[in-house]
Image (cartoon, helix red, strand yellow):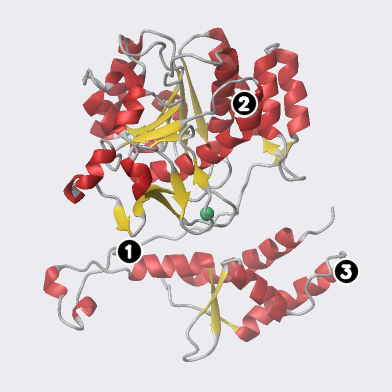
Amino acid sequence: MVLDTDRFLESVLDAIESQEAKLLVWGVVDGRISRTEIDEIIYPRVEQALEQGLEEFFDSEGVISELKSRGLLFETDADPYEGYRSRMAETVRLAFRLRQLFPNHDSVDGWQRAKTLVSDFRFTRRLRRYPIRNTTPEVLISDISGTENNLDQISVLKELLSDRANNYHLADFQVRALKRILESLRKGRSTGTLVSAGTGSGKTLAFYLPAITRVGELKLKQAQGVAWTKILALYPRTELLRDQFAEVYAESRRLDALLSSNNSKKIRIGALFGDTPESSLTFRNPKKHKWRRVSVGFVCGYMTCVQNSCDGELVWKNEDIDSKRERLFCSQCGYEIKEDEIAITRESLKKDPPDILFTTTEMLNQRLSDTATRHLFGLRPGAIRPPEMVLLDEVHTYSGNHGANVGYLLRRLSFLVRAPLTFVGLSATLQDGVSFF
Ligand SMILES: [Zn+2]
């Protein structure tokens, strides 16, 4: 196998970390690796890499600067000597040195008397493990075409996976989740699927690939007509909802061309939580909303620009608020999030439910019996059809009393919906997932 840059840098990082681990297991967090030590680690590996055909690095300077630019290595204070810490060791040090500040620590050097947040720790180092990604979109689609003879579904999936990077591959667990969830939807039975994989390994995709495929398929079948919530995405806390909201928004745009060629509307998403303003009139009273004011309008707090590496603030402009046009503009690149792509206010969510509704378990609990809102969760008489999927993110947080409450909430929802629901849970850390879920 040809040695690539990532693999090479990982082997250097592994060696640095294993050196650091010797002190960390004894609780020493201020250790650093000197320049001489790091050279001793890097030089033989650079020589080995050159022999294996990787000609990107010639000395330890180049390796160090690449590791630094990737945020994997940090330079420590020059006093008493120049040194380095890996991301791992620096994280442990910062977490261990963190202090709890209370009002009685107000004086200049008060923080020195404050207690540390962590009183003690134990450190174990384990090797990095990622799921192998070895299924190409083409293989996945021909595989699915073999078991599902649903042409709409296959054309949606093809569109979703087209125009990806050349080396775009899916991991086995993503493929299994996709197949299992699509099968559950086809059979029309209530099922539960738990996707458990480490942070950054792509478990979000394991959910939204089948979810957006299903929404796209339903929209192709029902080109026009009244809107209804097809998927409920539930989060334990508001902060956790933000990242996935932007990701699902961006992925949904991949189907715009296909849907419009079929005279179907675009996939529209919305979020119902504390920050969702009641209506455009809410902005007349600063006490009634939490959006930050800027000269041209108000900044949306739960989503930033989705254009590549832009991350600009999205603004609901004053003139659009006055004319009740629910669209947002990026303050940096001018990208427009259009009216038929998201719902901004509770008023428009209720009037025209989104295809995918993001909300918190607490909001669902509060609003499930509210006759003005419950149709948003797919409940009759207001809703024309029940939802089909419920996503539960960070399911490991649903433990103890809170977990029991959420369990009852989901049973209430199931009972009121009176239709099969496909539950999908996501978690990075869960022991005995089957019985838990
Ligand atoms: Zn932008």
Front-most of 342 and 189? 342
What residue appears at the point 62 percent right and 26 percent down from the top-left corner? 260
Left or right of 288 on screen, residue 312: right
Front-most of 155 and 30? 155
Name the mark on residue 51.
3
**Which dot, 2 or 3, sits closer to the camera?**
2
* Residue matched to label 2: 260
Q: Secondary structure at mark 2?
A: helix
* Residue matched to label 1: 120
What residue appears at the point 30 percent right and 39 percent down from the top-left corner? 276
Q: Secondary structure at mark 1?
A: loop
Front-most of 437 and 136? 136
Q: Which is more N-terminal, label 3 or label 2?
A: 3
Q: Residues within 10 Å of mark 2 (few under 14, many from 20)?
A: few
Left or right of 279 on screen, residue 190: right
Whole-percent x, y for residue 203 in the image: 55, 38
109 up-or-down from 310: above or below: below
Front-most of 115 and 102? 102
Q: Where on the picture, by quarter, is residue 143?
A: top right
419 up-or-down from 19: above or below: above
Q: Amino acid at mark 1?
A: Asp
Cα distance, mark 1 to mark 3? 45 Å
Whole-percent x, y for residue 157 in the image: 66, 26
